[in-house]
Amino acid sequence: MNHLPVLPVLIPMFVGALLLLLARSSMTLKRTLSLLATLIQVPLALMLISQADAGTLVYALGNWAPPFGIVLVVDRLAALMLGIAAVLASGVIIYAARGDDGLGRNFHAIFQFQLMGITGAFLTGDLFNLFVFFEILLIASYALLLHGAGSARVRAGLHYVVLNLFGSALFLIAAGTLYGITGTLNMADMALRIATLGPADAPVAGAAGMLLLIVFGLKSAIFPLYFWLPKAYAAATAPVAALFAIMTKVGLYSILRVYTLIFGAEAGELANLASGWLWPVALITIVLGAIGALAAASLNGLVSYLIVVSVGTLLAGIAMGTQEALTASLYYLVHTTWVSGALFLLAGIISRLRGPRFGSRLTPGPQMEHSKLISALFFIAAISVIGMPPLSGFLGKAMLLSAAGTGLQAALLYPALLGGSLVVLVAMSRAGTTLFWRNDAAPAIAEPLDRARLVAALLLLAGSPALVLLANPVLVYLDATAAQLLTPSTYIEQVMSIVPVASGDQP
């Protein structure tokens, strides 16, 4: 139990390496190992959520105390993100194990390395290691995006790689600049030093902070840096696109972490560095994402633009910066990650049922087998992602609008959020009628419904009603998480108070 915080990173790292060594082994063995390694992340995340609710865990790797050593920090936000990622990855791996993993080589090894990068990014308390874990998850995502080949994936993958390499270069420049000024890369220690910078160093540190905002904005796909996402996600296979639903949340998590801890209210001359930029960018992202959803030519493309809308919605809550708004954003983050993943998996099922001739294109096609069941699931996912009662999307948006109050913020947020929801309603209605009602084509050669794939989609979709049924304990935890984010001094004190201990003991 003393080493629990490092297990979410170590397990996928070692299993991924083992799967590479077993590359020529049977697919059954590789699937079994990958399934076990992924599913075990769920109880690990639940244990960490329970422990983080009682107090922040700080794990000093190699027993080197901060700021000189590398630390993993499990506060409420990090534990929450681990839980979201674990549930999403479990649904994805169940779906992929039904045949999608055989479209290319080493799927399961790459999947585990991707999971390692995601969990490491959530846990690290060090800015440079945030960069390292970004690179791990990005390199793995390049391979996953190209999994299954195809010219569309290659083109989308090329754009994705080039843009993210540019973002990685900016990240390295920003981290190096901050290290040169503050002499540290530990985020808690950096927050202490940023707050005491003089007028000569503060502008340079501020420029580095804005470079980081560009990097995180590119990762999270906010305006004007979102253009790579719809093509990349729409071109990926269904399980890969579903896993990528957490990728934008890594960028948003980084914005939350860096701009409340390092450049938050207690950062002296650089206090609330990004707050003036986040609000207009969030509103524009919502509007443009909704327009893109309306113009989408395929179900995969439509869901990809819904990711952009959700990013703008989450960013609006982060930009408001109050405890109530952050609580609403965190609730909406859980909802949108799972429902978006479920929609990508449903899109994959629908594409298989319609056959290769029609796929997920929003054109009239043949009558699908089990169309009543699939259309019912699509309807549930649609009303949840639109934000209609009684599912979690409605509750998340209602809390966000309530947090806006009655001033200028409300006057801007209401039309953007409600107007965007109306446009998404039209887009989802058009998609549903085209896929399930306009059946004027001859029957096509299609695959039968795979029940395991359906179970995987149901697992993620069930998260929406579960969030409503368990709203009280969930919101209690999220409210405490928001309060913890707004008091960075507690995080800093707990990290910086760690001292070396005897070998084998908890740091």
Image: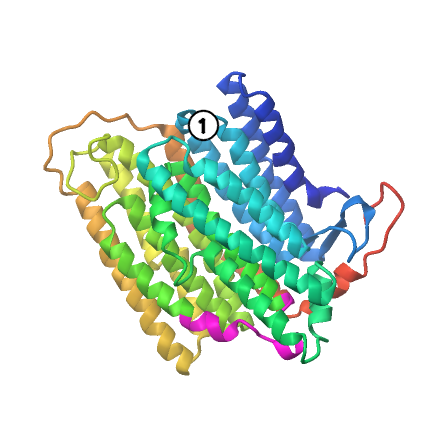
Residue 394 image offset from top left, x and y in percent: 38, 61
Q: Quadrant of residue 385?
A: bottom left
Q: Secondary structure at mark 1?
A: loop
Is residue 103 left or right of 9 when viewed as pictured? left
Residue 124 image offset from top left, x and y in percent: 66, 52
Q: Nearer the viewer, residue 285 or 211?
A: 211
Name of the residue lying farthest toward the right: 502
Q: Quadrant of residue 437?
A: top left
Name the residue rendered at 75%, 42% in the picture.
3
Q: Nearer the viewer, residue 277 or 359?
A: 277
Amino acid type indicated by mark 1: Ala
Applied colour scheme: rainbow
Is residue 360 left or right of 488 when viewed as pictured? left
Residue 279 image offset from top left, x and y in percent: 44, 72
What residue did someone put label 1 on? 97
The answer, for residue 110, to whether it is visible in the render is yes
Name the residue rendered at 11%, 30% in the picture.
442
Compared to 54, does 194 lie above or below? below
Tally the marks.
Answer: 1
Name the residue rendered at 50%, 37% in the picture.
90
Name the residue rendered at 57%, 70% in the picture.
207
The magenta stretch is: 261-280
Quadrant where the image shows the N terminus: top right
Binning the other alpha carbons within 10 Å of mark 1 as few (below 14), some (14 to 19) or many (20 upward) gives: many
Is residue 314 left or right of 206 when viewed as pictured? left
Compared to 276, does 470 lie above or below? above
Residue 369 image offset from top left, x and y in percent: 23, 30
